Image: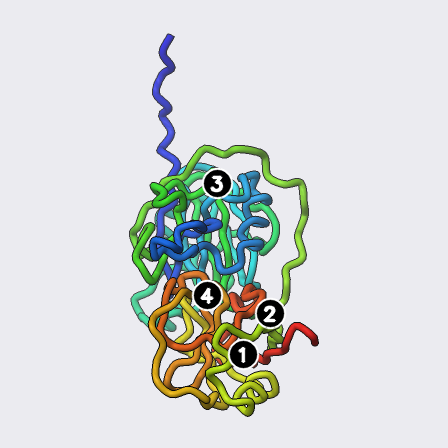
Amino acid sequence: MTRPPDPRPARRLEVLRAGALTTVQDQGRPGWAHLGVPRSGALDPAALRLANRLVGNPEDTAGLEVTLTGCMLRLTRAGTVALTGADADVWIGDGRRGDGRTGGGRTGDPNTGDPHTGDARWTGPRPGGHLGDRPGDVGRPLAVPAGATVRIGPARTGLRTWLAVAGGIAVPPVLGSRSTDTLSGLGPPPLRDGDVLPLGDPAGDPAPVDVTVGRPAPPLLRLRLRLGPRDDWFTPAALDRLLGTAYTVSPVSNRVGARLTGAPLPRAVAGELPSEGLVLGAVQVPADGQPLIFLADHPTTGGYPVVGVVDDVTPLAQARPGTTVTFHGPQR
């Protein structure tokens, strides 16, 4: 006997406002570096795994990585979402206001414009949400009615938030992963307003928790560094400087790498290297002497010398421009 067709709309996640940079991420595609493909994946893998557990997904399910400015989404079917990472306001609509950009019930002065872009024609949700919307919390499962919006505000501290949806983002995998690689272009492109993402079927029940405690974004990061393989290309004074002075995260940092500004590192060896392999956390020093820490979307080869490798780059996922970074050796 055949089943009658499901009259409900397909499970979809509609992107009403994509924000500065929102990408699809999972745990990445390890094992392809020999073909020039980096791992990619969530910059804080544990945060995405937690979000998935909160909504009942397997830990390797794809979700969204939302950078700084937040985003606004709509679920076509009732579901559960969870956010982890940077602290931000979250508002859940009631499913009765269309696309969240028109209709009554908004709060605030209609003449002040879009709080994010300054567009005076903006008719969407203002700080505090639509009348009838309910606030949510980062770090707990949130029920979302069919057709309702999920609005994630700008990060108050830190830089990135991870969103899991029950069933997961079901875009086609590339080399075993649904992650966006912003350097090579593998995987789905960064989200744009109007995109529609397919969702999978929920695999389990939401976690029975009220709230989880997130990891705060510290104003100063102390990163453990293992020197090599090219530390001999730098003067002793450069190594003392690297381990003894503070650097600042540059505004031109991204998912490829965290660029630092501070005291330049003078070389003991002139010239350039033939391209050689790069790994996650490699600290490369270009010609200007300013360190660059490679993150998830890093290239797999490079010609500038690598002075050392950071053991754990996860704290850099929440490092805003201006964050202070210091290095210490494994003995400290």
Separation (CA) of disc 1 from disc 2: 10 Å
Q: Which mark is residue 93?
A: none
Mark 3 sits on what residue?
145
Q: Is residue 63 above or below residue 317?
A: above
The answer to whether mark 1 and mark 2 are in CB contact below 8 A is no
- Quarter holding the C terminus is bottom right
- Separation of disc 4 and disc 3 at Cα? 36 Å
Q: Residue furthest top?
A: 1
Badge 4 crowding class, 10 Å Cα cut-off, few under 14, some 14 to 19, many 20 or more, is many
Q: According to the image, label 2 marks what residue?
A: 217
Would residue 231 appear left or right of 54 to someone viewing this image? left
Which amino acid type is marked by label 4? Leu
Q: Secondary structure at mark 3?
A: loop
Q: Which residue is mark 4?
A: 295
* The image quarter in which residue 214 lies: bottom right
Colour basis: rainbow
For residue 323, the mark is: 1
Mark 2 residue type? Ala
Quadrant of residue 226 within the rendered picture: bottom right
Q: Amino acid at mark 1?
A: Thr
Q: Which of marks 3 and 4 precedes in the sequence?
A: 3
- Tell me which numbered mark, 1 or 2, is placed earlier along the sequence: 2
Say whether disc 2 or disc 4 marks the residue closer to the N-terminus.
2
Query: In this orientation, which residue lies closer to the viewer: 106 or 326?
Result: 326
